């Protein structure tokens, strides 16, 4: 009796296998975020709507340029806090996060996919605001300024992704939107996203440098010449320290949660 041999496919190298997993997870996450209309329309729609209202009202003025930077910062913070903070909190409440942990998928792929999608939404927001700034706001923007703003926004998404991860581990899913708005809106207002910080009450001007959103705003506003006096390196250092603080706190919360499970 003849025996039939079965040839198994050769195992792929680990880097290639992880890259394929990451690509598939990123694509699935992108589709999920797009199909969640409450997220996709609000995250992109609010900065666009505000610019249509206030940018057009200040057409041809320096404030129209200011708002391109300010609302870009607002958009990236919103995309990170709601995309990762709310996303992971909901998946944790639904048990989806536990299923992901039990699967052989690398944990890093799960988080990196969410970060990459938040960065992609940030790019869409910046592109929309740059187009509106030139067309609706009558702002004069150079290619170099557009590229520098895009780079700052992409780099600035990392600290707020770390912040969103900590929020996702602490906040109940049903209370997530309210708590995130209580964090996000006051920080945005106090950091100069909507108006120059010199127009704010004096006590708010004193508090602002302690907020990570302030340092992101200063880096973006510096591109158009609206930043407060100071070294740009100080703002990068503040954002890097904030990122490490948030990641460290998230790691402690996560390890304690796993230990109790």
Image: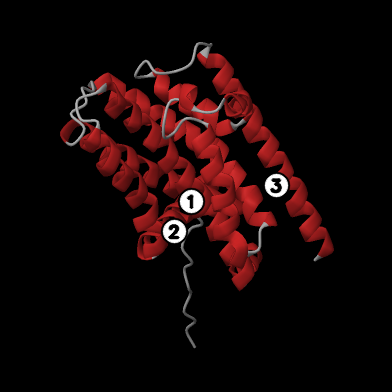
Give the residue at the far right of this rendering: 260
**Colour theme:** secondary structure
**CA gap, disc 1 and disc 3:** 18 Å
* Label 3: which secondary element: helix
Q: Give x and y (percent) for residue 54.
A: 29, 38
* Label 1: which secondary element: helix
Which quarter of the figure has residue 224? top left
Question: Which numbered disc, 2 or 3, marks the residue closer to the eye?
Answer: 3
Q: Give x and y (percent) for residue 231.
A: 53, 11
Of the image marks 1 and 3, the number of the one nearer the N terminus:
1
Which quarter of the figure has residue 212? top right
Q: Nearer the viewer, residue 255 or 9?
A: 255
Report the quarter where the C terminus lies. Answer: bottom right
Q: Is residue 128 visible?
A: yes
Which quarter of the figure has residue 175? bottom right
* Mark 1 closeness class: few <14, some 14–19, many ≥20 residues within 10 Å: many
- Which residue is the site of mark 3? 250
- Which residue is the site of mark 1? 113
Of the image marks 2 and 1, the number of the one nearer the N terminus:
2
- Which residue is the site of mark 2? 29
Residue 234 sits above or below residue 253 on the image: above
Give the residue at the far bottom of this rendering: 1
**CA gap, disc 2 and disc 1:** 7 Å
Identified at 42% across, 52% down, the residue is 23
Give the side of residue 125 with respect to residue 22, left or right: left
Give the side of residue 200 with respect to residue 129, left or right: right
């Amino acid at each position: 009796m003849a025996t039939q041999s079965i040839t198994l496919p050769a195992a792929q190298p680990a880097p290639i296998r992880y890259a394929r997993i990451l690509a598939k997870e990123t694509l699935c996450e992108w589709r999920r975020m797009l199909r969640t209309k409450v997220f996709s329309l609000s995250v992109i729609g609010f900065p666009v709507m505000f610019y249509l209202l206030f940018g057009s009202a200040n057409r041809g003025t320096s404030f129209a340029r200011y708002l391109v930077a300010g609302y870009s910062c607002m958009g990236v913070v919103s995309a990170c806090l709601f995309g990762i903070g709310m996303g992971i909190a909901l998946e944790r409440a639904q048990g989806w996060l536990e299923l992901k942990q039990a699967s052989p998928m690398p944990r890093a792929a799960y988080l990196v996919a969410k970060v990459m999608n938040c960065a992609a939404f940030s790019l869409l927001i910046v592109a929309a605001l740059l187009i509106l700034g030139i067309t609706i706001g009558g702002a004069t923007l150079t290619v170099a300024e557009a590229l520098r703003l895009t780079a700052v926004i992409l780099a600035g998404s990392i600290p707020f992704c770390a912040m969103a991860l900590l929020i996702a581990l602490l906040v109940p899913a049903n209370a997530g939107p309210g708590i995130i708005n209580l964090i996000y809106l006051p920080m945005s207002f106090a950091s100069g996203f909507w108006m120059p910080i010199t127009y704010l009450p004096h006590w708010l001007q004193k508090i602002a440098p302690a907020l990570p959103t302030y340092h992101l705003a200063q880096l973006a506003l510096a591109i158009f010449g609206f930043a407060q006096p100071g070294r740009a390196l100080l703002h990068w250092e503040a954002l890097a320290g904030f990122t490490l603080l948030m990641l460290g706190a998230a790691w402690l919360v996560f390890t304690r949660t796993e230990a109790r499970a």
